[in-house]
Image (cartoon, rainbow, N blue to C red):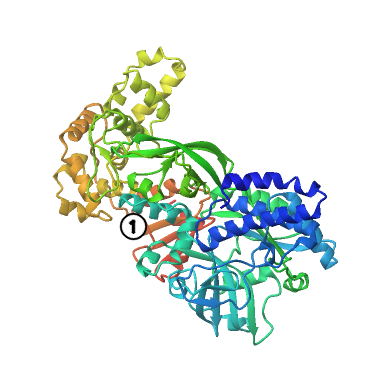
């Protein structure tokens, strides 16, 4: 076994090897490096249980390539550099790819790209080469086969030669057409390569559902997508809302000569035939300097994309030149992947602390040795609940694999029990609240332990923070730090206390001048005029988000009316299920909560509203949904304009949707809407034209 520490030590030592003059010693050391790679390949591909990150593996692989290049006599037939891939997990029927799915050569800096460009120019005899640059999607690789315009087979990459037949699961991905008019381009048979992924929104939504059901969340969108392809229960696959980008034509049988002769032309063709290709994300440029400019620009906005990417792929655009450049046994010479900063790393789990949230949920937090992941230093990671700790088999002292994907919160992918020394300690979950000391409780249908003492200091503070937050009562200048400070000093003890603050006492505190106090006073007074749905959301009722809060507000003229609703009446409201109804019912039947609402009304907050008039006209009775980035309005402003003009916002694409308003970088909602003929797909400009003068 080669542990992460041993692997790093070997990598560091290897930099001295080429200075040794003894050829036998060099051959021995290079074979040691091969054994390290073989071990980690087996862990990754066969056991599906890696010990090191992709970046660490790629670094070792590039070292081996370098050493074998300088000592060609040391190359062996079974070297990891001499083959496409390794073994498969034998669960699904196997199919042969028409053309091997080779991996791409990886680069991590500008020098690597410049050197690759130099080699391509030398082989081609050209002074400059036209390249197509596109995102490197961080998902699961697939190969699709179409014959006589019909989809006939879908397969995983597998070992590059042979993959798993996952045709039934591919058919559940709505962005994959079941038929496409390739015959228009003179193509009878075609094999297309692509990537299956889960966008960030669907990933978060799916994880929220898992957490709500007391199940551990998935680590990252890539694992979610890859795992979905191997699930045999179609209903589970369907729930994950997978999508597919198709980005390469690997093989065709022609009946004519109308097929595009450039890679960018192929992407255009796929797009026109109904596939989701990176047509809008790609850029055709001439020369490596233009490539570098686009790569750097794309990396800077990586976290703003609706899906995960881990780099960019640079391809020679002319397919005839691609054939001329050819390929090695491992990768094509006409393409290279530029990898962004690594987002995986290994670290040591040194302690576990416990946080209490506003609903009383006690969440364990892993304290790890600080490590850089994706350009961010990570030292604390939520480990969710007791079941999650058991599932991941976590112990204090463990070496753990960390991953951070874009704006997704860092996760512990897994522990590495093989590296244990015997000094590790079992994590013992507390039986009493770490803040107030009350006994913790866990219901049978949840994985979460809760403190049910509503006066628990931690819960009170978190409820106040939520109440004042931007999407709730929007009390500016009243952030987390001030809430904690005022609470510790005894100036604030509950939500109504926000409206009874002693500003003379605050004036004595460091950092609070007349201007900051004036701003805080104004923000608190302004919050009293917030509409009813914001107040309902601000109360922090479990399972009640902004959309449900609006639904509740629309059903009453005053908030206290909700205390009279039965469970059955609540469940008749749109998007209110059994669990949500139970939480709402419990909140408004609680005497302490109703007393708090009475206090807030006495302090000047609006607990009632006039029933809004239904505005007839272009938007009257129509339903809207927004996707992508709007240029002229914020999403919240656009939704408010719909409601002000009699329209209604819905939460997803269905036959109930009338208008989908599409902004830049539109995601899977657009693809789904295209399948429903009754939905009008419009631009932001067209939406604005629908609004009254």
Can residue 208 be seen at all in this image of the molecule? yes
Q: Which percent across, then down, holds residue 678? A: 39, 69
Q: Which percent across, then down, holds residue 21? A: 83, 50
Depth check: give the residue in front, 571 or 610.
571
Say left or right for 420 vs 653. right
Depth check: give the residue in front, 387 or 662.
387
Looking at the image, residue 336 lies above or below residue 426 = below
Q: Residue at x 57, y 55 (%)?
A: 309
Say left or right for 667 vs 327. left
Q: Is mark 1 on a helix, strand or loop?
A: loop
Number of callouts: 1
Can residue 479 be seen at all in this image of the molecule? no
Q: Which percent across, then down, holds residue 217? A: 39, 51
**Badge 1 local density, few (<14 within 10 Å), some, or many (20+)?**
some
Q: Which percent across, then down, holds residue 410? A: 48, 44
Q: Residue at x 23, y 36 (%)?
A: 452
Depth check: give the residue in front, 630 or 344.
344
Looking at the image, residue 74 lies above or below residue 296 = below
Q: In terms of image quadrants, where is residue 386? A: top left
Depth check: give the residue in front, 77 or 196.
77
Say left or right for 386 vs 58. left
Judging by the rendered image, the residue that carries numbered circle 1 is 620
């Amino acid at each position: 076994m080669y542990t992460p520490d041993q692997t790093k030590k070997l990598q560091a030592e290897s930099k001295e090897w080429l200075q040794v003059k003894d050829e036998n010693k060099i051959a021995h050391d290079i074979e040691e490096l091969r054994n390290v790679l073989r071990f980690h390949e087996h862990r990754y591909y066969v056991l599906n249980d890696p010990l090191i990150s992709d970046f660490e593996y790629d670094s070792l692989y590039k070292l081996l390539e370098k050493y074998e290049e300088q000592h060609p006599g040391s190359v062996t037939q079974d070297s990891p550099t001499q083959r496409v891939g390794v073994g498969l997990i034998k669960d699904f029927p196997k199919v042969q790819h028409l053309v091997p799915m080779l991996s791409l050569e990886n680069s991590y800096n500008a020098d690597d790209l410049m050197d690759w460009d130099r080699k391509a120019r030398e082989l081609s005899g050209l002074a400059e080469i036209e390249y197509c640059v596109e995102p490197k999607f961080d998902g699961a690789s697939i190969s699709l086969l179409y014959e006589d315009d019909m989809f006939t087979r879908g397969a995983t990459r597998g070992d590059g030669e042979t993959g798993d037949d996952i045709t039934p699961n591919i058919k559940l991905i709505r962005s994959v057409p079941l038929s496409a008019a390739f015959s228009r381009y003179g193509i009878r048979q075609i094999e297309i390569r692509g990537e299956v992924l889960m966008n960030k929104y669907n990933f978060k939504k799916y994880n929220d559902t898992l957490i709500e059901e007391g199940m551990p969340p998935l680590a990252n969108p890539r694992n979610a997508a890859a795992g979905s392809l191997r699930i045999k229960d179609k209903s589970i696959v369907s729930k994950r809302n997978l999508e597919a980008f198709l980005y390469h034509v690997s093989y065709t049988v022609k009946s004519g000569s109308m097929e595009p002769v450039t890679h960018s032309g192929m992407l255009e063709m796929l797009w026109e035939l109904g596939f989701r290709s990176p047509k809008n994300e790609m850029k055709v440029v001439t020369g490596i300097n233009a490539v570098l400019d686009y790569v750097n620009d794309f990396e800077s906005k990586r976290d703003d994309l609706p899906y995960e990417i881990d780099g960019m792929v640079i391809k020679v655009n002319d397919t005839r030149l691609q054939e001329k450049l050819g390929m090695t046994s491992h990768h094509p010479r006409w393409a290279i992947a530029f990898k962004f900063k690594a987002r995986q790393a290994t670290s040591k789990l040194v302690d576990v602390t416990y946080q209490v949230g506003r609903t009383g949920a006690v969440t364990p937090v892993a304290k790890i040795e600080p490590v850089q992941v994706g350009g961010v230093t990570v030292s604390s990671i939520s480990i969710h609940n007791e079941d999650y700790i058991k599932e991941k088999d976590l112990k204090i002292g463990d070496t753990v694999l960390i991953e951070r994907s874009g704006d997704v919160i860092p996760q512990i992918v897994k522990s590495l029990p093989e590296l244990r020394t015997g000094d590790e300690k079992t994590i013992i979950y507390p039986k009493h609240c770490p803040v107030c000391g009350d006994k913790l409780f866990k219901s049978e249908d949840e994985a979460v332990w809760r403190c049910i003492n509503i006066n628990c200091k931690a819960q009170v503070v978190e409820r106040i923070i939520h109440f004042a937050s931007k999407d709730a009562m929007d009390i500016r200048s009243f952030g987390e730090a001030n809430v904690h400070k005022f609470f510790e000093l005894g100036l604030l003890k509950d939500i109504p206390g926000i409206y009874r603050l002693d500003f003379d006492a605050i004036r004595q505190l460091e950092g609070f001048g007349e201007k900051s106090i004036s701003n805080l006073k104004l923000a608190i007074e302004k919050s009293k005029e917030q509409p009813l749905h914001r107040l309902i959301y601000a109360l922090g009722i479990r399972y009640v988000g902004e959309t449900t809060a609006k639904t509740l507000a629309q059903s009453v003229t005053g908030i206290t009316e909700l205390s009279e609703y039965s469970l059955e009446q609540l469940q008749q409201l749109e998007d209110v299920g059994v669990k949500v109804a139970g939480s709402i019912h419990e909140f408004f039947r609680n005497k302490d909560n109703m007393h708090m609402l009475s206090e807030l009304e006495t302090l000047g907050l609006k607990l009632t509203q006039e029933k809004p008039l239904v505005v007839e006209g272009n938007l009257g009775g129509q339903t809207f949904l927004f996707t992508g980035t709007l240029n002229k309005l914020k999403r919240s402003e656009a939704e408010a304009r719909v409601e002000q003009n009699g329209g209604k916002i819905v939460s997803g694409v269905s036959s109930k949707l009338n208008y989908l308003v599409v902004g830049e970088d539109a995601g899977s909602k657009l693809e789904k809407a295209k399948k429903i003929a009754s939905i009008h797909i419009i631009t932001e400009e067209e939406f604005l034209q629908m609004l009254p003068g």
